[in-house]
């Protein structure tokens, strides 16, 4: 009988490639020392909600109370005041406050309507409705919600609020640089409307700025009276326009003065009519059919009048009033950040 041929081991057997894995690929349980030395995952400070809910109550005039159950984290990231309040360690807080049985009662100044404008977010309501923006402005200022406050402030001018109300808002929020954008439209409205047209509430909104507005209106009235007494000068005769020779130009001047004193002066000094605006004056001159006034003389005078945008000295009076109110309110300048390139 033939002897069995001995089986030679594979030259790769001790390499672990047949049925086994070589040591570098072999699955091994990590040692305890490696586990201890691995860094532990950390929670994102920005995107880690606690899941804790809190209940607020707010009054809905005249005699109704609304409860709101919201996440604490969503409030803390939007308001400095709420972040400070809810940042207090839980051990020092009442265990029952902020529940449906014992809600946190908001102050009377934060009505249900205002609180909802804060919770809804400014991207989800009509920013053309004044009440929405003003509610958001009030509550975001109270809760120091900078993002909502900046948005509400940027929308105030577009609401076309009455000038006294706009100036009153500027006084209340004078600590913010954006309020500077409200002063010019407020002053413009106050200078173009007689003070007697404002009610008591509007006058109180003007507040400390009342003397500045009153003095500015006096200076503007003086400018109108000067123009009523001394007419706008008729353009001198131009040799390029021979249709108005020297012997005829004197009639142009007489016609111009007669028209001015009979029409413009009456409008400028009228005791009961609203003050004639400069644009109204230009339109009145433009549409009038003059006798003995050559078209060339009238057209050159109109060009000169249209080069002005208001009565003489009035722009200076306006800008001085704006500057005085900004100083009175002590409105800060926008913070400028300069980066080295």
Image (cartoon, grey):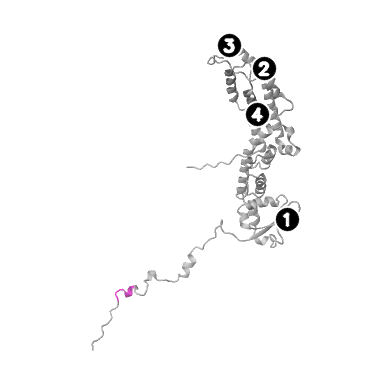
Which badge, 4 or 3, comes first in the chain's sequence?
A: 3
Magenta-colored span: 10-15
The residue that label 1 is drawn on is 65
For mark 3, give the secondary structure: helix
- Of callouts 1 and 3, the N-terminal one: 1
Q: Quadrant of residue 99?
A: bottom right
Which residue position is annotated with label 2? 258
Circles 4 and 2, Cβ within 8 Å, touching? The answer is no
Q: Secondary structure at mark 4?
A: helix
Q: Which mark is residue 92?
A: none
Task: Residue under label 4, please give it.
Answer: 317
With respect to residue 147, does 257 lie above or below?
A: above
- Please indicate, yes or no, whether residue 229 appears anywhere in the rendered image: no
Q: Nearer the viewer, mark 4 or mark 3?
A: 3
Does residue 242 lie above or below 68 as drawn? above
Element type where label 1 sits in the image: strand
């Amino acid at each position: 009988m033939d002897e069995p041929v001995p089986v030679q081991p594979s030259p790769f057997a001790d390499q672990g490639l047949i049925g086994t894995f070589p040591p570098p690929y072999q699955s091994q349980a990590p040692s305890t020392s490696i586990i201890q030395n691995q860094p532990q995952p950390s929670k994102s400070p920005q995107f880690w909600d606690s899941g804790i809910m809190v209940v607020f109550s707010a009054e809905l005039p005249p005699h109704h109370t609304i409860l709101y159950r919201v996440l604490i984290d969503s409030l803390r990231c939007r308001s400095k005041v709420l972040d400070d309040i809810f940042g207090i360690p839980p051990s020092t807080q009442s265990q029952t406050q902020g529940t449906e049985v014992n809600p946190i009662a908001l102050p009377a100044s934060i009505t249900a309507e205002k609180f909802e404008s804060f919770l809804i977010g400014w991207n989800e309501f009509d920013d053309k409705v004044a009440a929405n923006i003003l509610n958001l402005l009030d509550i975001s200022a109270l809760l120091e919600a900078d993002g909502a406050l900046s948005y509400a402030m940027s929308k105030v001018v577009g609401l076309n609020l009455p000038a006294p109300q706009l100036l009153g808002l500027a006084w209340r929020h004078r600590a913010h640089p954006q309020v500077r954008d409200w002063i010019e439209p407020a002053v413009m409205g106050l200078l173009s409307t007689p003070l007697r047209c404002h009610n008591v509430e509007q006058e109180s909104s003007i507040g400390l700025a009342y003397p500045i507005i009153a003095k500015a209106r006096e200076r503007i009235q003086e400018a109108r009276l000067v123009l009523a007494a001394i007419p706008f000068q008729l353009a001198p005769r131009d040799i390029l326009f021979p249709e108005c020779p020297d012997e005829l130009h004197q009639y142009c001047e007489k016609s111009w003065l007669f028209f001015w004193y009979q029409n413009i002066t009456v409008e400028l000094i009228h005791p009961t009519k609203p003050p004639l605006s400069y644009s109204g004056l230009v339109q009145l001159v433009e549409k009038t059919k003059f006798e003995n006034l050559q078209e060339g003389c009238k057209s050159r005078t109109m060009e000169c009048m249209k080069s002005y945008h208001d009565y003489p000295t009035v722009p200076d009076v306006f800008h001085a009033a704006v500057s005085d109110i900004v100083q009175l309110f002590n409105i800060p300048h926008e913070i400028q950040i300069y980066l080295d390139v």
